Image: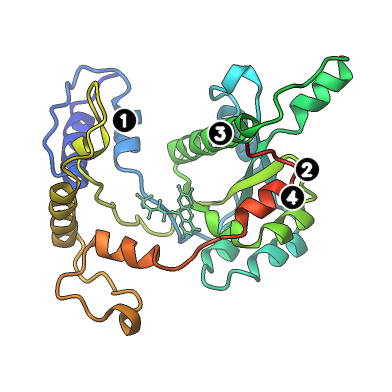
Amino acid sequence: MTNPTDAKAIEEVLAQRFGETLTVDPSLQGLETLRRMASRRVCRRYLDKPVAPELLRLLLACALSSPSKSDLQQGDVVIVRDAAKRRAIMDLIPSMPWMKDAPVFLVFCGDAQRMPRISALRGKPYPNDHLDAFFNSTVDGAIVMTSFITAAEAVGLGCCPISVVRDNCEVLRDVLALPKRVVPIAGLCVGWPATEGRLSARLAIDARVHVDAYDAGRLEAQLDEYDRRRNAREPGLKQRDPARWGEAPFYGWSEDKARQYAHPQRTDFGAFVRAQDFKLD
Ligand SMILES: Cc1cc2nc3c(=O)[nH]c(=O)nc-3n(C[C@H](O)[C@H](O)[C@H](O)COP(=O)(O)O)c2cc1C
């Protein structure tokens, strides 16, 4: 069913997001889906209202219907229902209270343990124990998570991925009994949104979409344009670590990300992945 209101809404929201006016044909099918995708935003505040288990199962089934490398189906999900287990994971991350408030908490994983077991069960060799197994399974898991978010948002739920759970990978592994060759990708808070949240501006489309050849030659100008456009929409970004870097007279996204990544993050993750028996060569 077509809806001219959706077409206009998409044009408006994408102009806010990218600073570019796109023309949306109001006779296109699926505009409601595009409107939801274009206007999506992370949700960190939830109503005190449960998500019915049968709805969660439906959304998971939709997510698991996503494409999968070689049909290997290597993206798995753990529903963290047990209160003590949730506490064990969340107590380590007091800076993100929305993890506690979310009615549902999931952990998306790359699962590379099933395939070698299938090979053994069927009496076949498994000469593919190398980096590709890690890459394929984590990509599959990330696709499942993205599909889950799209499905959840389609029914009005809000989500917040949580990669910070990987700051404590060993705890996560032990609490959720993750076997060797299973690696957590991110947690996901899910619930009914208590607020609309804010639309986050993105780098220009042309900074991330390349035609025929990758072009990173205009990065500086693209960053400058983005920083100014984003600051105009969302002024007052709190400056990170002024004691180390001082107060910048103009503080944009790129300065913020450069400051964020001036701190080492998860430098032990490679060791964890290797300890999970992934071969990274
Ligand atoms: C893989 C992944 C990990 C994330 N990890 C966290 C996290 O640990 N904590 C958090 O509050 N948000 C997390 N986020 C949410 C991002 O901060 C958010 O998507 C980003 O700021 C852009 O905002 P938007 O989704 O509203 O466009 C994560 C998002 C992704 C895709």
Please name the residue shown 66% across and 21% down the image. Answer: 72
Q: Amino acid at mark 1?
A: Leu
Location of residue 264 with respect to 193 vertically, above or below: below
Q: Closer to the N terminus: mark 3 or mark 1?
A: 1
Q: What residue is drawn where x is 30% and y is 42%?
A: 39
In the image: residue 135, left or right of residue 146: right
Is the CB–ligand 1 distance for label 3 below 8 Å?
Answer: no
| CB within 8 Å, label 4 to label 3 | no
Q: Which residue is mark 3?
A: 144
Q: Check contact, mark 4 vs mark 1: CB within 8 A.
A: no
Q: Nearer the viewer, residue 160 or 253?
A: 253
Q: Is residue 45 above or below residue 222?
A: below
Q: Nearer the viewer, residue 171 or 125?
A: 125
Label ID, residue 176: none
How is the rendered protein coloured?
Answer: rainbow
| Location of mark 1 (residue) | 34
Q: What residue lies at 72% left-to-right and 66% top-to-bottom?
A: 88
The answer to which of marks 4 and 1 sits earlier in the sequence is 1
Q: Position of residue 258 (x, y in %)?
A: 32, 62
Q: Residues within 10 Å of mark 4 (few under 14, many from 20)?
A: few
Circle 1 — which element? helix
Q: Which mark is residue 180?
A: 2
Residue 115: image x %, image y %?
Answer: 75, 25
Nearer the camera: disc 1 or disc 2 = 2
- Marks 3 and 2, how far apart at CA: 20 Å
Amino acid at pointer 3: Val
Judging by the rendered image, the residue that carries numbered circle 4 is: 275
